[in-house]
Structures are given as C-alpha cells and as structure tokens.
Image (cartoon, grey):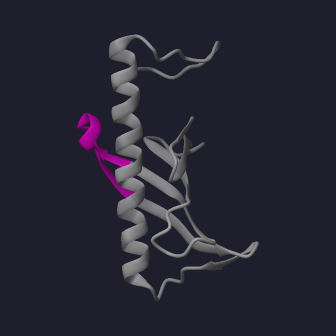
Amino acid sequence: MCVEDEFSAVFVENALGRPRSLRLTIFMNDHKFSPDERLLNSGILELVAYRGADSLYSVTEIFTALIKDGSYEAVTDEDKMGLALAGQDMVNSVNAVIEQIVYMVKIGTFAKAEGSRTEL
C-alpha cells in the first residue's frame, strides 16, 4: 500500500517470513534540508502492542540515507540520533497510515484488492 502527500510517499507492506512485521519505505521531499535533498527511510517494524493508531512497534531493521544529485549518503550506525529520529518517523508514519485506513473503512471508501488476504 502507498500513501502520499505533497511532502512524502510511504510504502507499507507485509515483511515476508516475519510474523507481525511490516516493511516500510518512506521517501521525503521535505525542504527542511535543502531544496535539492531528499530523505529515504526504510526498514522493518515488528508489532509489539496493537493500539489502533497508537500501536507500539520495535524497529528491527533500518536504513536511512540523504539523497542529493542522484546519489545517496547513508546514515551510519555512529549517527545514533539520526537513526533514532528515522525510527521514530517510521513508527509515526505507519500509525498514520493505519489511522487513515481505519477511517476509510469506517466511511466506506476503502476497498481491498480482489483476492487480497488482508484482514481489516
């Protein structure tokens, strides 16, 4: 599933072979950096506790990079603050997507793809 706005695109999919886990990829076009820089966060979130739009996740894998001029610079393990912020952004994003899906189901505008096994 992909959810996007003018600042970002968030891709959420099941993490194959990992129960209760989601693979998340976020492309951010947020000009907090500079007009020609983009941010990429990718990783796997494992559900710890389901609370609807405030569910708790553990970030089990993470990759973060700054994209500029067609190349990227990965955030390394030494940048603990950068990785912590990226992890929190991933959790916030997946909760926002879940909140949007729940809202769409309630108002009747969410349609599962034919043959989908997703349970709502």
Q: Residue 20: percent from the left, percent from the top?
A: 43, 41
Q: In which quarter of the image is residue 115?
A: top right
Q: Nearer the viewer, residue 103 or 34?
A: 34
Give the answer, above or below, for where 99 lies relative to 86. Answer: above
- Is residue 95 in the magenta section? no
**Nearest to the observer: residue 32 or residue 90:** 32
Name the image quarter holding residue 54: top left
Q: Residue furthest front?
A: 35
Q: Position of residue 85 (x, y in %)?
A: 37, 70
Q: Where is residue 76 in the image (x, y as percent from the top left)?
A: 54, 83
**Front-most of 6 and 41?**
6
User: Residue at coordinates 38% horizontally, 17% vertically from top-left?
Assistant: 105
| Left or right relative to 94: residue 74 | right
- Snapshot quadrant of residue 112: top right
Q: With respect to residue 84, does 92 lie above or below?
A: above
Name the residue at the right extreme.
Answer: 70
Q: Kindly identify the residue that appears in the image at 52 percent across and 46 percent down.
A: 18
The one nearer the camera, 102 or 6, is 6
Q: Position of residue 37 (x, y in %)?
A: 60, 72
The question of residue 49 being in magenta is answered with yes
Q: Quadrant of the N terminus?
A: top right
Quadrant the C terminus occupies: top left
Residue for point 35% across, 13% down: 107
Q: Which residue lies furthest to the bottom in this view?
A: 78
> Where 82 falls versus 20 (above or below)?
below
Task: Please report the residue visible at 42 percent of the width from the left and 56 percent of the height from the top.
Answer: 90
Magenta stretch, residue numbers: 47-58
Q: How many numbered circles does the render carry?
A: 0
